[in-house]
Image: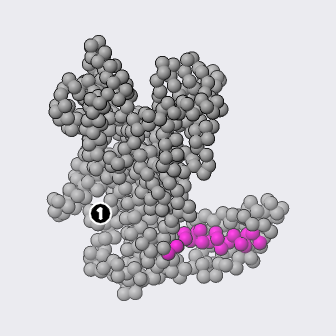
Amino acid sequence: MIHVADPLVTLAACLAPAFEAVAGRAGIDPVVRPSDRADAQANGALALAKELGKSPREVADAVLVQAKQLTGVCSSIEVAGSGFLNIVFDNAFLGDELAKVAADERLGVSTASRSRTVIVDYSAPNVAKEMHVGHLRSTVIGDALVRLLEFVGHRVIRENHIGDWGTPFGMLIEHLVDLGEDEAADHLSLGDLDGFYKEARAKFDASDEFKERARARVVALQSGDGETRRLWRLLVQLSTEYFNLVYSLLGVRLTDDDIMGESAYNDGLSSVLERLGKLGLLAESDGAEVVFPPGYTNRDGDPLPLIVQKGQGGFNYATSDLACVIDRIERIGADLLLYVVGAPQAQHLSMVFDVARMAGWLNEPAEAVHVAFGSVLGSDRKMLKSRSGETPKLVELLEEAVARAGDAVAEKNPELPEGDKAVIARMLGIGAVKYADLSTDRIRDYVFDWERMLSFDGNTAPYLQYAHARICSIFRRAGVDRASLRSVTPTIVEAQEKALALAVLGFDSVVADTIEKYSPHRLCTYLYDLATAFTAFYEHCPVLKADDAVRESRLALCDLTARVMERGLGLLGIDAPEQM
């Protein structure tokens, strides 16, 4: 792989020895940032001045004298204001860096310095319950992180921790028996999982006889009764087949092979209790077996317990989650566990992780991270509801997105063949839903707004997809093979060319930053800025009408921009159509 650093990273590396020479010690950060006064600004003199007891401008002047590694990287560097270094990159340097990126299949994105075994826990629907809009965030954020982590060379294991165990399965299995397997299969295959669940619940609430049968069925399920387990597996299979339809429509990578439901850890629950007991970590609280991790209190200020075994002898989510940590670290050998789970579960997961550390199961370098996210809201800024007042089914929301996108495509390009319109509508609609979610800082709530997310203006998927398609149309009109331009070294002259070059060369840094913070919105922001830089370039720098050498240079820059745009969208799980 050809490594091409972000010019800002290169600049920081070139300036660091100069700052260290002035400081008389290593480890000085030049604090390089983009600047609207120049291409970049180094602000490290401000902090160093306090350390040395000098003025920032005096320190900056001394750094400038020592800066001997900037030849060929910068065309000018000057001290400004109260000790800032304003820096302008050399255009030839930027052109050479662009040529290196163009020759690299990875577009300059470096692989991880240390490959890790990462488990990403995401999506997690419940058997016999509909996937709703609440599952959207976990699924698309998790899928984007999987793609990013795989791209930089980590071993990534996807785990879909579906809810496939527990007391509700007694009533669900009995309802399946009452309906008959064929009718139940028809019922569930049509996607009416909520209807099936509600019918079972209504029977359970209304009939003591059904309630008794359901409770007996739970006992049979947990004791391993063959017929009950067969019916349970049928219920799980029918539900997962429907989940797969949703995943296929959404374009995420989850498959049946990624399912690790609650049932997978059932046999290990007693072991969790036993191991905690041997470590002396268990205490009794109101008849329950609990662990008191330090630092957690209730409203009254009393220590808050993590309940491992209920007073009646049953286990709960905490027990299952601890068994899950043990399995992921001891059996799989993972050293990074990512839980893409809603923010309301923050305290529960924090307590689980702390207990796992107390028990010695979650030791460095292994770490567990809660990748928390906010809620999807309606226009009233309350939890998003359908017209009937219920949480919208995810599949219906996605189908509506495709339909609305189809209308937009037909209006924008009515000459497209119908088959092409359908393909593009799906790319556009699903991309719009995903991008609206991913482009929001994941910890924040966001308002689900059809008009905004499907707009061809602003920070939306259609805007980015259209920018990519626009570049592809340039090459169709030019009749030029894009691959033939990848040995061309672009010549940077105009300000808009330079701004686009700097945007393209920032791809490596933003991928690393997105992964470090587990925040896909950072990549989204970068792609929006890249598309905006391309729009300004295209408006001010003629491509097809330029003289031959300039035309070739600008076509090469267009091709590279499109490749970065396509790869970036792909890392988010979003398609980049070539025409719209």
Residue 492 located left or right of residue 483: right
Q: Residue at x 73, y 69 (%)?
A: 19
Q: Residue at x 29, y 12 (%)?
A: 208
Q: Residue at x 44, y 59 (%)?
A: 150
Among the 4 quarters of the image, the one containing residue 203: top left
Work out whether residue 525 can be spotted: no
**Residue 486, horizontal then vertical, whole percent:** 40, 79
Among the 4 quarters of the image, the one containing residue 215: top left
Residue 358 located left or right of residue 406: right
Q: Residue at x 63, y 33 (%)?
A: 279
Q: Main SS of the magenta segment?
A: helix
| Residues shaded magenta | 2-21
**Residue 577, horizontal then vertical, whole percent:** 29, 63
**Residue 421, horizontal then vertical, whole percent:** 20, 58
Residue designated by label 1? 577
Residue that protrudes farthest toward the right in the picture: 53
